[in-house]
Amino acid sequence: MRLAIATLAIIAPLFMSACGSTASSGAEAAPAPTPVATRCNAAPAQFAVGRIVDAALESDARARAGAKTSRVLKPDQVVTMEFNAERLNLSVDNTGRVLRVNCG
């Protein structure tokens, strides 16, 4: 019994020290990630509501919103639901008229 306790007393600190983190000599910490600079802001792109979408309108709306990408969403179209803060969505009706402008 004493041998088991003595062994545990020696081994336990070794296992616990493996959980700690130490900086290696001469190594610098990794820089913090920079925030995304191209976040979408749908407010400046609201001019597109009521207009028929075409490549020029989509490009202009994307540029005004500061979005990196854009997509036109047609009625009943299957789309991915993941949120993308850099994407502008132009929701249109069956005639191609923009009904809604939002980011995501």
Image: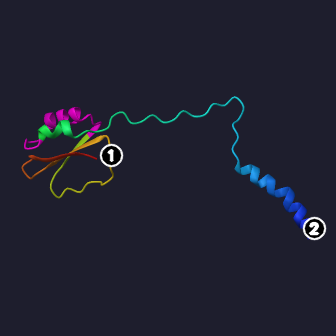
* Alpha carbon distance from label 2 to label 1: 61 Å
Q: Which residue does the image show at 7% across and 44% down from the upper left?
A: 50
Left or right: 100, with 88 as reference point: left
- Asked whether 45 falls inside the magenta stretch, the response is no
- Identify the magenta region: 49-69
- Amino acid on which the number 1 mark rests in the picture: Asn
- Asked whether 59 falls inside the magenta stretch, the response is yes
Determine crowd level at label 2: few under 14, some 14-19, many 20+ residues with C-alpha closer than 10 A: few
Instruction: State the residue position of label 1.
Output: 84
In percent of width and height, residue 100 lies at 15, 48
Label of residue 2 in the image: 2
Q: Which residue does the image show at 27% across and 37% down from the upper left?
A: 67
Label of residue 52 in the image: none
Q: Is residue 9 above or below residue 44?
A: below
Q: Nearer the viewer, mark 2 or mark 1?
A: 2
Secondary structure at badge 1 equals loop
